[in-house]
Image (tube, rainbow, N blue to C red):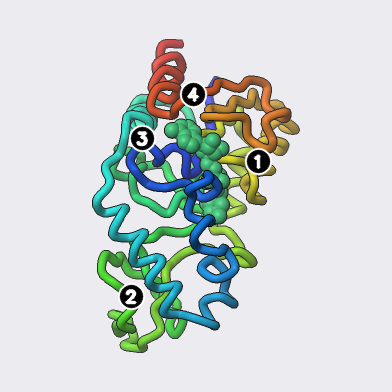
Amino acid sequence: MQNIVILTGAGISAESGLKTFRAEDGLWENHPVEEVATPEGFARDPDLVQRFYDDRRAQIRAAKPNAAHEALGRLDREWGGELLLVTQNIDDLHERGGAGRLLHMHGEALSAWCRACDARHSWERTLRDGPPCPACGAAALRPDIVWFGEMPYQMERIFSAIAQADLFVSIGTSGAVYPAAGFVQEAARVGAHTLELNLERSAGSGFFDETRLGPASALVPQWVEQVLAK
Ligand code: APR
């Protein structure tokens, strides 16, 4: 076993106190997707959308990585083969848990993107008051988030990693949102072993060779231990 691709979702950060999207008290309960997570919603009411992501940014800054993030950081340090950690999460808990071979396919809450000059900037403050872009000065910064109807980042790199994968592991994601939800089928097609670690069965659970159910803070460290012991 040499090449590992891992996909993570909101469930891995739940035990750090960050809400998932589709739980009963999840983010999409009180914030309709079309209002806060589409380009059309942003055009209609930018202040509402900036406020939603200002809140996300503040909560992320106050959260700490949990045992699952730390275990993936350890795996990244100790695994000699290829590894790519693809996260749908916009928080920075994987980075703070020590993961380096990481990409954020749905963008990052702590990044701002200038619609005028296309520059991206690390961003911890509010975007609500229309701050100038540090590169061009235009008041055109938006959250660097991939909204519904927009193209996720780095798809070519992700699919080429999956094409070489021996093991594909999905952690803490409901499998409701494509293209991420389809990665398991692609991994199975190229002959990778597929493993799901989640609190409950995801929408695509039937496509996995193996499913382990439980909280990420328990399942992920156990699995990492097992992989590194081989
Ligand atoms: N440990 C493991 N899994 C958990 C835990 C936990 N402690 N808590 C919740 N989960 C699982 C839930 O059972 C659920 O299957 O995490 C999953 C979270 O699902 P979603 O809320 O749908 O989050 P996610 O799959 O990341 O959403 C995908 O949807 O709106 C978009 O862009 C947003 O990236 C997000 C995408």
Residue 182 in the image, given as x and y percentages of width and height: 69, 43
Q: What's the CA distance linking mark 3 and mark 4?
A: 15 Å
Q: Secondary structure at mark 4?
A: loop
Identity, as a three-letter code, of the amino acid under mark 4: Gly
- Mark 4 C-beta to ligand 1 under 8 Å: yes
Mark toward the viewer: 2 or 4: 4
Q: What's the CA distance linking mark 1 and mark 3?
A: 21 Å
Q: Earlier in the sequence, mark 3 or mark 4?
A: 3
Residue pictured at 45% horizontal, 19% vertical: 223
Q: Name the disc covering residue 47, or none.
A: none
Identity, as a three-letter code, of the amino acid under mark 2: Leu
Locate residue 220: give its quadrant. Answer: top left
Residue pictured at 37% horizontal, 71% vertical: 51
Q: What's the CA distance linking mark 2 and mark 3?
A: 28 Å
Q: Which residue is mark 3?
A: 69
Q: Earlier in the sequence, mark 1 or mark 3?
A: 3
Mark toward the viewer: 4 or 1: 4
Q: Which residue is mark 2?
A: 127
Residue pictured at 30% horizontal, 82% vertical: 129
Viewport quadrant of the N terminus: top right
- Residue extending furthest top? 230
Report the side of 161 relative to 128 (left or right).
right
Mark toward the viewer: 3 or 4: 4
Mark toward the viewer: 2 or 3: 2
Depth check: 175 or 21 in front? 21
Residue pictured at 66% horizontal, 27% vertical: 192
Q: Secondary structure at mark 3?
A: helix
Q: What's the CA distance linking mark 4 and mark 1?
A: 22 Å
Q: Which residue is mark 4?
A: 214
Q: What's the CA distance linking mark 2 and mark 4?
A: 37 Å
